[in-house]
Amino acid sequence: MKIIIGAHMPITGGLSKSAERAKELGFEAFQIFTRNPRGWNYPALREDEVKNFLDASAGFYSINSHMPYLPNLASPKDDIYEKSIQSLVEELKRAKKLQLKYVVVHVGSHLGVGLEKGKTRVINAVKKAINSISCDCYVLLENMAGQKNSVGSRFEDIGEIISNIGSDRVGVCFDTCHAFAAGYDIATQKGLEKTISELDKHIGLKKVLLIHLNDSKGGLGSGSDRHERIGKGFIGIKGFKNLFKEKRLIEDRPMIFETPVNDYHEYLEDYKVVQSILNARD
């Protein structure tokens, strides 16, 4: 069973620096923001910037980007909705140039107008974005943490959205913290087995293409999107020990740390915890 570990890398100093940092830590995969995640602007990528990134990132198993924070594909506000769709279109264009495998997207919030309306907005938004550009990059919908008005905290809702989009270029990024916070008890063996069964039933495990590997600062069903270092939250070491026994979920899928760190070197601490779990398992 191949285990692929990576982390969200900073792009300070240029996009190519993210690849250099991931390589320095010995990762086989990594995730980036291709632009400022706290703004709407998407400045054009320079040719030298693209070339430097492609040279530095050669040999990685998987590289993906994450959409910025502001877009909301479920928004009932037309101005935000249209800007969000355009933001996804631009991200896909950037992903094509940078030869990224996946673009991860938070499903979004319906802001109180209702789940069904929110799902319809997401379906139409992703359809429009995907149809606007031809590329090999997948759009991965990330499960939400059960926040108020969230769309995509339940697997059945994500499955319905994907089914109605009707594209082979749409899959799922499974976030461990978000699943736990949304009420899926992946901290226990029984709960994990049930979670995987529901994932397969409503979405299909073959559509789970990436994992965000995070512990949770909030308790089970807390609805709190607050990540914690591996083994230090409510999922705990025991929960991750169970997870790494589940070949059905983790085999050949890149697993990306998004744990709270002050410096990217600190990801090595999470990596060491995972390695110790894997060594004990073997």
Image: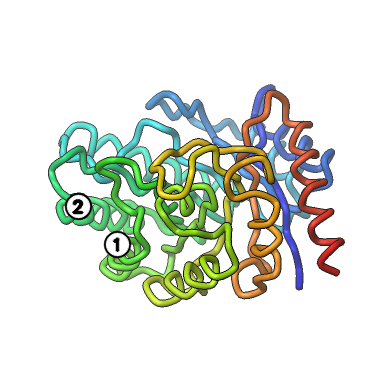
Sequence-first tag of 2 and 1: 2
Q: Position of residue 136 (x, y in %)?
A: 51, 61
Query: Which quadrant holds the C terminus?
Result: bottom right
Q: Are marks 2 and 1 in contact (CB under 8 Å)?
A: yes
* The N terminus lies in quadrant: bottom right
Give the SS element for disc 2.
helix
Image coordinates of residue 121 in percent, x first then y, are 21, 51
Mark on residue 157? 1
Image x and y of residue 133, in percent: 39, 54
**Nearest the eye: 282 or 35:** 282
Q: Residue at x 76, y 32 (%)?
A: 266
Scheme of image coloration: rainbow
The residue beneath circle 2 is 115
Q: Amino acid at mark 2?
A: Leu
In the rendering, which numbered label is found on residue 218?
Answer: none
Viewed as shown, does residue 140 lie left or right of 165? Answer: right
* Residue situated in front as seen by the camera: 38 or 59: 38
**Number of marks in picture:** 2
Q: Quick check: 32 above or below 158?
A: above
Residue type beneath disc 1:
Asp
Q: Is residue 85 left or right of residue 138?
A: left
The structure residue drawn at horizontal position 23% and vertical position 33%, both measured from the top left corner, is: 80
Going 29% across and 58% down the picture, which residue do you hit? 127
| Left or right: 140 as drawn, with respect to 73 | right
